[in-house]
Structure formats: structure tokens, C-alpha cells
Image (cartoon, rainbow, N blue to C red):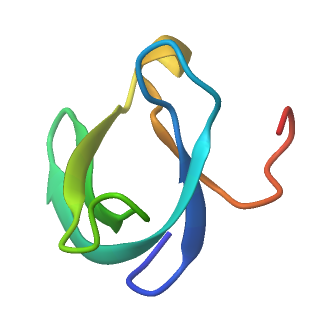
């Protein structure tokens, strides 16, 4: 995924929310995505862990299971 891609994000206790990637930072343990959401247009950071499906918070729109 890259800047300007439409994605959905997993948040605490609610349905997945749709947004747009504003920035991407890659680390050894995974990738951070700054995602603009309706309530947070300036963006919120989400982290996708490399080795854990439970640690995947950002997915492309229309990904399996959505």
C-alpha cells in the first residue's frame, strides 16, 4: 500500500473505518501508516506487524473479509 490508497482500518470495538493513506514509514517489525479518517482529517498512525495477522490494522479497500 502507498500514499493516496483508499484503505480500511481496524479500531477498538467498532466496525472498520475507511480512509486514505497520507504517509508510510517502514520499520524492521512492520509498517506505520498515517491514515486520514473522517473524524481525523490530519491523520492517525496505525501499525501493521509483519509476523501477526492480529497485528494488521490497515488493509486495502475491498480486501478479503471486508
66 to 12, vertically: above or below: below
**12 or 58, nearer to the observer:** 12
Image x and y of residue 50, in percent: 37, 31
Q: Quadrant of the C terminus?
A: top right
51 relative position to 1: left or right: left
Which residue is rendered at x = 19% and y = 32% of the image?
29
49 to 64, vertically: above or below: above
**50 or 11, nearer to the observer:** 11
42 to 11, vertically: above or below: below
Which residue is rendered at x = 14% and y = 40% of the image?
28
9 relative position to 51: left or right: right
| Residue that lies at the very extreme toward the bottom in this rendered image | 4
Which residue is rendered at x = 86% and y = 40% of the image?
64
**22 or 15, nearer to the observer:** 15
Image x and y of residue 55, in percent: 40, 20
Image x and y of residue 5, in percent: 54, 79
Image x and y of residue 4, in percent: 45, 87
| Residue that lies at the very extreme toward the front in this rendered image | 39
To which quarter of the image does residue 16 belong? Answer: top right
3 relative position to 22: left or right: right
31 to 41, vertically: above or below: above
Q: How many marks?
A: 0
Amino acid at each position: 500500500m502507498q500514499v493516496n490508497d483508499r484503505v480500511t482500518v481496524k479500531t477498538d470495538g467498532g466496525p472498520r473505518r475507511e480512509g486514505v493513506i497520507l504517509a508510510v514509514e517502514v520499520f524492521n517489525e512492520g509498517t506505520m501508516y498515517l491514515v486520514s479518517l473522517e473524524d481525523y482529517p490530519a491523520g492517525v498512525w496505525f501499525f501493521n506487524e509483519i509476523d501477526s495477522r492480529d497485528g494488521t490494522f490497515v488493509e486495502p479497500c475491498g480486501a478479503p473479509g471486508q
